Image (cartoon, helix red, strand yellow):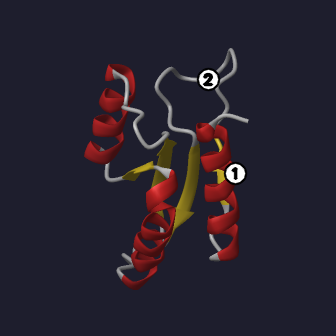
């Protein structure tokens, strides 16, 4: 198992333990290039997670996708083994900042 795969599994477990439902975004033939690895909806906000090893960098396509998602109001996190707990804590804080829509 690669470090990135281990991190994906650790993120999935940490989100579930925190009560956050998350879903993998497939990278198959019908997927959009540059799409992040996981997503969740927290307090009405789309949250995307791109998983990288400690030294991994976003590709140009992934960076463009991040910028587009954030421009549309989504949250985006680059998740590494060393920051999983911090990311989950930040996502939980979105519940505190919930935006109510009618």
Query: Quarter of the image holding residue 83?
Result: bottom left
Residue drawn at the location 66% of the way across and 34% of the way down: 2
CA distance for labels 2 and 1: 20 Å
Viewer-nearest residue: 101 or 21: 21
Q: Residue furthest right?
A: 1
Number of residues whose C-alpha sits closer than 10 Å to that of mark 2, classed few (under 14), some (14–19) or many (20 or more): few
Q: Residue furthest top?
A: 29
Specify whether residue 51 is in view: yes
In the depicted structure, whether residue 77 falls above or below residue 33: below
| Residue linked to disc 1 | 9
x, y percentage for residue 65? 37, 31
**Quarter that holds the C terminus:** bottom left
Point out which mark residue 31 bears: 2
Q: Secondary structure at mark 1?
A: helix
Q: Residue furthest bottom?
A: 96
Query: Quarter of the image holding residue 1?
Result: top right
Viewer-nearest residue: 85 or 18: 85
Specify whether residue 102 is in view: no
Residue drawn at the location 66% of the way across and 39% of the way down: 5
x, y percentage for residue 59? 37, 23
């Amino acid at each position: 198992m690669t470090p990135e795969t281990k991190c994906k599994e650790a993120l999935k477990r940490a989100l579930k333990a925190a009560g956050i439902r998350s879903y993998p975004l497939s990278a198959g033939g019908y997927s959009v290039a540059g799409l992040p690895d996981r997503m969740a909806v927290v307090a009405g906000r789309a949250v995307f997670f791109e998983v990288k090893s400690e030294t991994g960098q976003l590709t140009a396509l992934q960076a463009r996708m991040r910028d587009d998602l954030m421009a549309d109001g989504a949250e985006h996190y680059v998740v590494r083994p060393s920051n999983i707990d911090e990311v989950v804590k930040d996502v939980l804080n979105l519940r505190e900042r919930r935006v109510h829509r009618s």
